[in-house]
Image (spheres, rainbow, N blue to C red):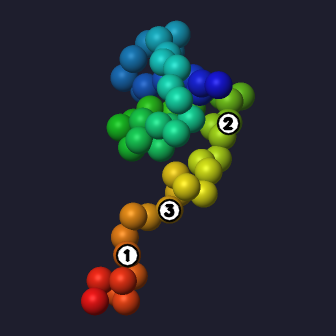
Amino acid sequence: MTVRMKHPTLPPEQTIDVQPATVRAHERMGWTVVDGQAPETPSTAEGKSPRRSPKENS
């Protein structure tokens, strides 16, 4: 499944289809999800930070 997005500086009919995992990155670049579409929530593996706890670093 893809998510349709638009950008405020482009004509309203000019949209792009992106993978749900990339929606947040596109939103940081100014893109918004087209009305009526909700991106899927990322899986727990995609949402975890790669950082290690202080105990793991010592």
Between 1 and 50, the one lying in front of the other is 50
Q: Which mark is residue 52?
A: 1
Mark 3 or mark 2, whichever is nearer to me: 3
- CA gap between label 3 and label 2 equals 21 Å
Q: CA distance from mark 1 to mark 2?
A: 32 Å
* Residue 23, numbered circle: none
What is the three-letter code of the residue carrying label 1? Arg
Residue 50, by quadrant, is: bottom left
- Badge 3 element: loop
Residue occupying the far right of the picture: 36
Q: Quadrant of the C terminus?
A: bottom left
In the image, residue 17 above or below residue 28: above
**Image-quadrant location for residue 52:** bottom left
Under circle 2, the secondary element is loop
Q: Amino acid at mark 3?
A: Lys
Residue 48 placement (x, y as % from top left): 50, 62
Give the amino acid type for the residue marked by disc 2 in the picture.
Ala
Q: Which residue is mark 2?
A: 38
